[in-house]
Image (spheres, rainbow, N blue to C red):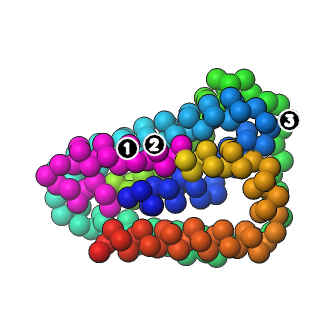
Amino acid sequence: MASFALVGAITPGPVNVLALRHGSQGAQRQAWLYVLGASLSYVGVVATMGLGATQLQQMLPRLAAAGQWLCAAYLLWLAWKLARAPVGPQAATLGDATPSPWQAFGQGAAVQALNPKAWLYALSAVGVFVLPHTATPRMALGLLCAVSLLACLLGIGCWAVSGRALVGWLSSPRHQRALHLALAALLVASVLGMLA
């Protein structure tokens, strides 16, 4: 569960691109509040998906088994797409305005809440780690929320902390490809682990 959550939190996406930007601006407080906002927002997404899915599971018990396999298939497709993701020059032109610390927090929360990747990944996580626990779904959801919070703080925080250094390293298509392949392999390993 932890490696699954970390892969979801650290893979490139809009939330992490903005974390990279906040980190590269040198304003630590803004960067950390952005990371906190995005992380707490993701926990809200996971909780929402989990509570809705457990209610649906009680109405349709066979959905859990099918959901686990559908979620695993989606995640393997996501790993395949990640391994084949294009590499090349980064084209990110963002404005020069630096938000206030609390605007950065709100931006992190909003970007995460509106991120389709977050909703799909949360649904997959719930399908794999919560729905199979029919006896204790709320406990499993609480554990998933806690692990997701820690993974987001670490994963998104990693992008914020690395800022300029990561941008320089990822300017090489070879390095971009290596990152994509490593993250795809971690995702496949987490899917195989959950199905075992």
Q: Which residues make up the magenta segment? A: 127-153
Which element carries disc 1, helix, strand or loop? helix
Which element carries disc 3, helix, strand or loop? loop
What residue is disc 3 on? 96
Asked which quadrant contains residue 28, the reply is top right
Instruction: Provide residue 22's location: percent of width, then percent of height.
Output: 73, 39
- Mark 2–mark 3 Cα distance, whole angstroms, equals 29 Å
What residue is disc 1 on? 145
Decide: few, some or many residues near mark 2? Use Cα within 10 Å; few <14, some 14-19, many ≥20. many
User: Residue at the spot x=48%, y=36% of the render?
Assistant: 40
Instruction: Provide residue 18's location: percent of width, then percent of height.
Output: 70, 44
Q: Amino acid at mark 3?
A: Asp
User: Residue at the spot x=40%, y=48% of the render?
Assistant: 147
Asked whether disc 2 touches disc 1, contact meaning CB atoms under 8 Å apart, the reply is yes
- Decide whether residue 97 is among the magenta residues: no
Q: Amino acid at mark 1?
A: Cys
